[in-house]
Image: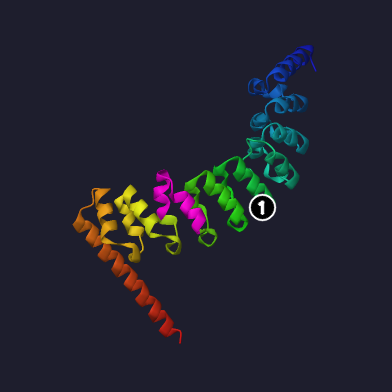
Amino acid sequence: MSDGKRNAEKEALEEVSRDGDALRYVPPELKTAELCMAAVKLNGRILQVVPGDFRTAELCMEAVRQNGRALRFVPRELRTARLCMEATKQNNFSLGDVPEEYMTERMCLEAVRRHHYEFAHVPEKLKTPQICDEATTEYGHALRLVPDGLKTAEMCEQVMKWETNADMFKYVPDRLKTAQMCMGAVRHHGRLLWYVPWEFRTADLCMEAVKSSSMSPKTCGRWNCAWRRRSETANLNTCRRSLSAR
């Protein structure tokens, strides 16, 4: 190795040791395993510019210890359970970068507690009542991602008490809707009348729907008729299926 290149590598190492992001500007021929290791210890996300040959298990571990989001730049074959667990300890960790086979209920719960939007990355099979409660308490719109079987009256009432979550009314199962909840929804916007069960569609409720939107009384009436026809058709089809099964 020439003295010129040796000096250049030394200068690059000194620069990267002060600022890991400086690795971006180091010419490919000057990048070494030692240089890359020094960089990821200061800035884990700089792993994205580390040459593939230098992305070893040891270097990737150092990267995710420094920044959990570096996990997305770790080669798939190096994303082990241990490496993923190490990444979850960081505040900026993203569950979406963890292979599903390495996810656990505990990992998902911790991720959702840290950032509610991580709930979108929780697999259906790992969604528990506790995880769903955590997600909807912090962010009402997460209700649309909760399986119907895990939705409870308390959860839905908690979400619907905030006006900003009014649109989530459509994701509340009919069995959990109450007269008060339905009234609050249509007061927010009349179009939510479509999701109100028939037994709660009173004259007062329909009038509130008209008041809270540009919907005319005639349109409200048509919606009611259409909804009733849909319900009657569904009931008729259910009866037909029952009879044919005998």
Question: Which residue corresponds to mark 1?
Answer: 105
Residue found at x 79% / y 12% = 3
Question: Quadrant of the image for the C terminus?
Answer: bottom left
Total labels drawn = 1
Q: Within the magenta stretch, is there residue 158?
A: yes
Amino acid type at circle 1 is: Glu
- Residue 79 position in % (x across, y down): 70, 44
Q: Within the magenta stretch, is there residue 219?
A: no
State the extent of the magenta-drawn residues as a range: 153-169
Location of residue 182 with respect to 85 vertically, above or below: below
| Snapshot quadrant of residue 57 | top right
- Disc 1 secondary structure class: helix
Question: Quadrant of the image for the N terminus?
Answer: top right
| Snapshot quadrant of residue 88 | top right
Q: Nearer the viewer, residue 220 or 120?
A: 220
- Residue 49 position in % (x across, y down): 65, 29
Q: Is residue 3 left or right of residue 185?
A: right
Q: Nearer the viewer, residue 32 or 21?
A: 21
- Whether residue 144 is visible to the viewer of this picture, yes or no, is no
- Residue 17 position in % (x across, y down): 73, 19
Colour scheme of the rendered structure? rainbow
Residue found at x 64% / y 48% = 108
Q: Is residue 29 left or right of residue 246?
A: right
Location of residue 222 with respect to 232 vertically, above or below: above
Q: Residues within 10 Å of mark 1 (few under 14, many from 20)?
A: some
Q: Nearer the viewer, residue 15 or 222?
A: 222
